[in-house]
């Protein structure tokens, strides 16, 4: 008899075989797998007592703490759907997501209470659970998390629910290329197979000690929230990305594996303590979110002896669809050549399905490293669609293929490498930033006549938004004026970091903006110009 493919079953296995092993380390707190299992079961039972049923949606806005990890299991094993929220978003975006997702409950960390306080009266929630933070003021009307789960005795079995593998597990919102976030519907089967890819291709082992540098809200921690439990490894939580603290954890907890955007790598290698940090031999780091520079990979290997594994994916694909497979023959190449190879997105993973690069006519590009096309993919990890948005779903998934919007080439060995981003998406520090969203804000300023936003290289964040602005006649604005104007109307990480005032924007005879000409002086000699 076939059983449901769900990553939740891995918690059962971990509790069964590793009950006394440390499952979670969160600053001064530690939980064995038995204790972790008991807490998630208590959460499930408490949620049921509070009226949460199979298919209900529960929003969660927490940093990388044991509470966030417990929520993934406690909510989802009830058959409910978890809605992880990006705590960096503006109050306006959060209001839209919480209401659009039909969330009945919100579990929120007190550190992030302020934006929720602003919109509390506009939210269609039935209940709020708050996680206490020492010294943090909180004016939210909610029930304390610990008090909430302690209503249920330890040892209480989780509610018995029949879960189908194609039902929703999580609803993950992504800004995409429009101003309104889109709800990506990810099911149990897709998460199971993506986490299987995480385990296999990142060489996850029972002895691994995994540091959650990557936000768990970001595509479910890329699958790490499930995969580490599956192997019986140890989760080490990290509330904030602080390079000095991370380096200290490397030594104190003997970290063996972590994931993060290239900007995290950059922070680590440039920290003054990096050269003196005693890193455990063979420590691996998976990176994605923005193509990492070859020079950065080389630096990470030289300073921290990090084994960098480049992966690629999107929230819509659970997220992994490519990884840069390392071959023995690459060992004979120079360090620079090796770093250049590791900067490529790579080849299909074992369990995700088929991924390829096609021309506009749908034909595969030549495997010559020059023929440019769009990355498309199909398989079990692709989303079910965008929540309550069939039009956007039809645009994204055509004839069974999901169109990523990323432009790339394929090398003779099948390795794919991104050369540009369709729709002018900017990926800054691993976060999607829409140029059109920023332009929309800029155009609301009475003194802005025209505006264009492009990605420009940045040492810390990989790339950041730059605004090029044509002012109204006789208007006078400074760079600081524009940046502050945007920051007051959108999430701060989305606002432009650089502003340039120009007389005119380059256009074609038909009036189409030529952004590639704006990029030239920033990306000269690279495919980013095109």
Image (cartoon, rainbow, N blue to C red):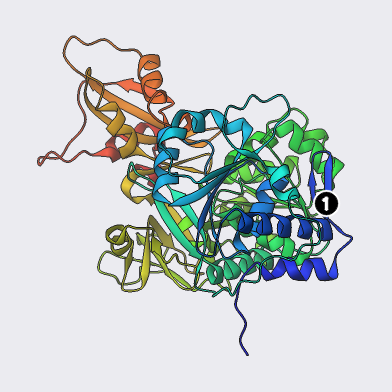
Please identify the quarter of the rendering in which residue 108 is found. Answer: top right
Which of 95/509 is in front? 95
| Residue 174 image position (x, y, % from top left) | 44, 49
Q: Residue at x 30, y 12 (%)?
A: 477
165 vs 178, left or right, is right
Q: Residue at x 36, y 20 (%)?
A: 485
33 vs 72, left or right, is right
| Residue 404 image position (x, y, % from top left) | 39, 59
Which of 82/272 is in front? 82
Residue 90 can be seen in this image: no
Q: Residue furthest right?
A: 20
Please identify the quarter of the rendering in which residue 519 is found. Answer: top left
Q: Residue furthest bottom?
A: 1
Q: Residue furthest left?
A: 510
The residue where tag 1 is placed is 31
| Residue 149 image position (x, y, % from top left) | 71, 50
Please identify the quarter of the rendering in which residue 517 is found. Answer: top left
| Residue 443 image position (x, y, % from top left) | 24, 28
């Amino acid at each position: 008899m076939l059983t449901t493919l769900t990553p939740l079953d891995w918690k059962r296995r971990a509790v069964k075989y590793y009950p006394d092993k440390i499952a979670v380390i969160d600053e001064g707190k530690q939980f064995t797998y038995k204790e972790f299992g008991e807490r998630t079961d208590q959460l499930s039972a408490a949620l049921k007592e509070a009226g949460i049923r199979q298919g209900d949606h529960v929003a969660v806005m927490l940093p990388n703490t044991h509470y966030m990890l417990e929520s993934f299991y406690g909510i989802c094993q009830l058959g409910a759907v978890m809605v992880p929220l990006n705590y960096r978003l503006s109050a306006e975006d959060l209001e839209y997501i919480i209401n659009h997702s039909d969330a009945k409950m919100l579990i929120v960390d007190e550190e992030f209470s302020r934006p929720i306080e602003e919109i509390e009266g506009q939210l269609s929630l039935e209940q709020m659970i708050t996680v206490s933070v020492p010294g943090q003021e909180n004016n939210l009307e909610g029930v304390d998390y610990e008090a909430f789960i302690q209503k249920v005795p330890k040892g209480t079995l989780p509610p018995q629910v029949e879960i189908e593998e194609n039902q929703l597990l999580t609803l993950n919102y992504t800004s995409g290329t429009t101003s309104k976030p889109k709800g990506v519907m990810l099911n149990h089967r897709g998460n199971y197979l993506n986490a299987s890819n995480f385990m296999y291709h990142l060489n996850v082992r029972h002895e691994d000690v995994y540091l959650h540098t990557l936000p768990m809200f970001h595509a479910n921690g890329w699958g790490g929230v499930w995969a580490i439990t599956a192997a019986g490894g140890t989760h080490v939580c990290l509330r904030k990305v602080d390079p000095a603290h991370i380096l200290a954890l490397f030594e104190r907890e003997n970290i063996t594996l972590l994931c993060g955007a290239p900007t995290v790598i950059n922070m680590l290698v440039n920290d003054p303590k990096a050269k003196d940090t005693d890193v455990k031999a063979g420590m691996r780091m998976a990176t994605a979110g923005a193509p990492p520079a070859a020079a950065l990979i080389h630096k990470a290997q030289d300073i921290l002896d990090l084994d960098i594994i480049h992966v690629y994916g999107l929230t819509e694909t659970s997220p992994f669809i490519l990884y840069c497979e390392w071959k023995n023959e690459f060992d004979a190449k120079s360090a620079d050549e090796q770093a250049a190879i590791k900067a490529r997105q790579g080849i299909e993973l074992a369990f995700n399905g088929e991924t390829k690069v096609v021309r506009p006519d749908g034909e595969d590009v030549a495997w010559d490293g020059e023929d440019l096309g769009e990355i498309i993919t199909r398989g079990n990890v692709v989303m079910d669609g965008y929540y309550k948005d069939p039009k956007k779903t039809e645009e994204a998934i055509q004839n069974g293929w999901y169109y990523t919007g990323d432009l790339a080439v394929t090398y003779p060995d099948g390795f794919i490498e991104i050369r540009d981003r369709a729709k002018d998406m900017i990926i800054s520090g691993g976060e999607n930033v829409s140029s059109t969203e920023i332009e929309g804000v800029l155009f609301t300023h009475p003194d802005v006549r025209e505006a264009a936003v492009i990605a420009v290289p940045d040492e810390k964040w990989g790339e950041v938004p730059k605004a090029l602005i044509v002012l109204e006649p006789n208007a006078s604005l400074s760079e600081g004026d524009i940046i502050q104007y945007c920051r007051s109307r959108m999430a701060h990480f989305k606002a432009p970091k650089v502003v340039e005032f120009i007389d005119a924007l380059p256009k074609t005879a038909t009036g189409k903006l030529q952004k590639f000409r704006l990029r030239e002086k920033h990306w000269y000699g690279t495919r980013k110009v095109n």
